[in-house]
Amino acid sequence: MRQELIFGPMGALAFLTFGVLSVMPFRRIRAVRAGLVRVRDFKFGESADVPGHVSIPNRNYMNLLELPMLFYVVGLMYFVASRVSTAVLILSWAYVAARCVHSAIHLTHNNVLHRLAAFAVSNFILMVLWALFFVSW
């Protein structure tokens, strides 16, 4: 198996993160222009006056900088150890898909139960990736 194939899902997750990052200024600028917030409401992050639909992209972006870091690490571990397999690639792409679903839910209808389900699935897949690395060592 070509070990560098692990970089596909890793790159896809990075580009999802960049995509969510790009949503933030659009929502913030639109809110300022609509008079919903003032520029100073973003001086120290986001004040309590920032409406949820404007602050959600920032929260989702932060989500993509938290647990997904463990995905990047385990992906590099598999690559360095030359242990990327078909199963690892399938799980990695499944992880990215679950994170995409989580972000799509968070940035659109934001149903908490739907979002929780996608988040839980992604975390379970991530734990399996870590466990497989050490169990099959």
Image (cartoon, helix red, strand yellow):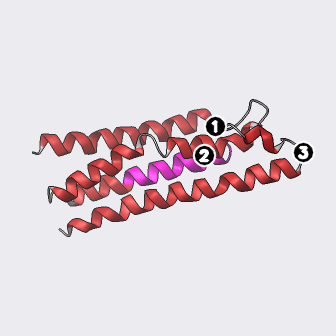
Report x, y in % for residue 47. 73, 33
Find disc 3 in the rendering and name its residue. Answer: 35
Query: How far apart are the two marked residues, 3 and 2, measured between alpha carbons?
Result: 26 Å
Q: In the rendered view, does 56 fall on the left or right side of 90?
A: right
Find disc 2 in the rendering and name its residue. Answer: 105
Q: Residues within 10 Å of mark 1 (few under 14, many from 20)?
A: few
Residue at left offset 56%, top offset 48%:
103
Q: Look at the image and say whether residue 2 sits in the magenta stretch.
A: no
Report x, y in % for residue 116. 52, 34
Q: Residue furthest bottom?
A: 2
Q: Look at the image and say whether residue 108 sits in the magenta stretch.
A: yes
Q: Secondary structure at mark 2?
A: helix
Report x, y in % for residue 86. 22, 60
- Proximity of marks 3 and 1: CB atoms separated by less than 8 Å: no
Find disc 1 in the rendering and name its residue. Answer: 111
Q: Which comes sooner in the sequence, label 2 or label 1? A: 2
Q: Secondary structure at mark 1?
A: loop
Rendered position, 52 above or below 75: above
Residue at left offset 54%, top offset 58%:
18
Amino acid on which the number 3 mark rests in the picture: Gly
Residue at left offset 56%, top offset 46%:
61
Q: In the rendered view, does 104 fall on the left or right side of 89?
A: right
Residue interval drawn in magenta: 94-109
Q: Quadrant of residue 6?
A: bottom left
Q: Quadrant of the N terminus?
A: bottom left
What secondary structure is the magenta-colored segment mainly? helix
Image disc number at residue 26 = none
**Mark 3 or mark 1: which is in front?**
3
Q: Quadrant of the C terminus?
A: top left
Report x, y in % for residue 81. 14, 55
- Proximity of marks 2 and 1: CB atoms separated by less than 8 Å: yes
